[in-house]
Amino acid sequence: MEEACTRQGTIKFFDPKVLRCFAAHNWPGNVRELRATVEFLVAMSEGKVIKSGDLPPYMQYGIAPERFAARAACKWLLTSLRRA
């Protein structure tokens, strides 16, 4: 988180719910996936606190990404990009 915030010139914090989602996620891409997710959340979240609603839907709902509906994933991505 510190590295991502430094690169993006901001300071952010995780809501405890986000940390619980992180702990429950399988992380099939291991550290690389975790870093990419943190970078994305720091860049796309509004405010200083990253909330569970900022997480990708498959993490919010505990569904494996490969099983998550492509339509819902695209909708989430478009919504996130509109916020940027």
Image: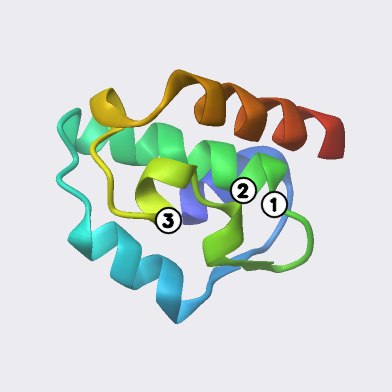
Q: Which one is in front, 67 or 1?
A: 67
Task: Residue type at mark 2: give it.
Answer: Val
Percent of width and height locating residue 57: 47, 45
Q: Residues within 10 Å of mark 3 (few under 14, many from 20)?
A: some
Indicate the secondary structure of the residue bearing disc 2. helix
| Sequence-first disc among 2 and 3 | 2
Q: Name the residue under label 1.
A: 45
Residue 60's mark? 3
Q: Nearer the viewer, mark 2 or mark 1?
A: 1
**What's the mark number on residue 42?**
2
Could you tell me how far apart the alpha carbons at marks 2 and 1 are, in whole angstroms? 6 Å
Q: In percent of the image, x 52 and y 64: which residue is there? A: 52
Figure coloring: rainbow
Q: Mark 3 belongs to which amino acid?
A: Gln
Residue 84 seen by the camera: no
Instruction: Specify the amino acid type for callout 1.
Output: Ser
> Which mark, by number, is residue 35?
none
